[in-house]
Image (spheres, rainbow, N blue to C red):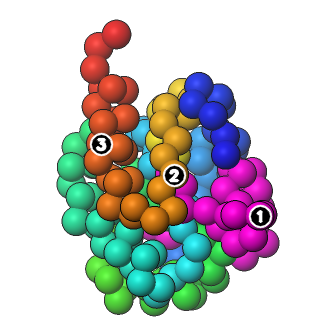
Amino acid sequence: MLTVGSKAPEITATLDDGSEFVLSDALRTKNVVLYFYPRDFTTGCTKEACNFRDNYSAIAEHGALIVGVSTDSADRHASFRESHNLPFPLLADPGRTVVHAYKARGLFGLGTARVTYVIDRQSTIRAVIRHDLNISAHVPEVLAALAKIAAPA
């Protein structure tokens, strides 16, 4: 995994709606919550996505955009997003380029880790959250990290 305080690698990839996501473009106006997960439609990944969905407003109030990332195709992401009424985009990474850039490889280098990065508008990683099994722990830690970004120094 990458570390808190490091610069977030620039990424350009396809979203579930077929449009292009460029991290630096998103960071011009919002902080970014980039969460990696193994597969669409699996029990844990569905629970995590719905947890982000259910807390979307609270995260957005902190000036943040949520972007989910897995190695599934854009078409599969579109179906997953529609099935669960997700109000945020999903980034398709079938070539694992983004997974590798963010060192989000699963155990023994297999699959994708369940890791979330909170990236501020200066492209600095402000939080790295990894809970492979305690899926519901991501959102509270994301909100705490976003609150620290918004707090005066």
Mark 1 lies on residue: 108
CA distance for labels 1 and 3? 30 Å
Q: Three-letter amino acid code at disc 2?
A: Arg
Quadrant housing residue 7 = top right
Quadrant occupied by the C terminus: top left
Q: Position of residue 76 (x, y in %)?
A: 55, 88
Mark 2 lies on residue: 130
* Element under disc 3: helix
Which of discs 1 and 3 lies nearer the camera? The answer is 1
Vertical arrangement, residue 105 with respect to residue 6, above or below: below
Q: Is residue 109 magenta?
A: yes
Q: Position of residue 81 (x, y in %)?
A: 40, 80
Residue stretch rendered in magenta on the structure: 88-116
Left or right: residue 19 compared with residue 83: right
Front residue of 19 and 89: 89
Left or right: residue 106 compared with residue 133: right
Label 3 Cα crowd, 10 Å radius (few <14 / some 14-19 / many 20+): many
* Element under disc 2: strand
N-terminal label among 2 and 3: 2
- Residue drawn 78% across and 63% down? 109
Left or right: residue 67 compared with residue 96: left
Q: Is residue 46 visible?
A: yes
CA distance for labels 2 and 3? 15 Å
CA distance for labels 1 and 2? 15 Å
Q: Is residue 27 visible?
A: no
Q: Three-letter amino acid code at disc 3?
A: Leu
Mark 3 lies on residue: 143
N-terminal label among 1 and 3: 1
N-terminal label among 1 and 2: 1
- Residue drawn 59% across and 47% down? 23
Label 2 Cα crowd, 10 Å radius (few <14 / some 14-19 / many 20+): some
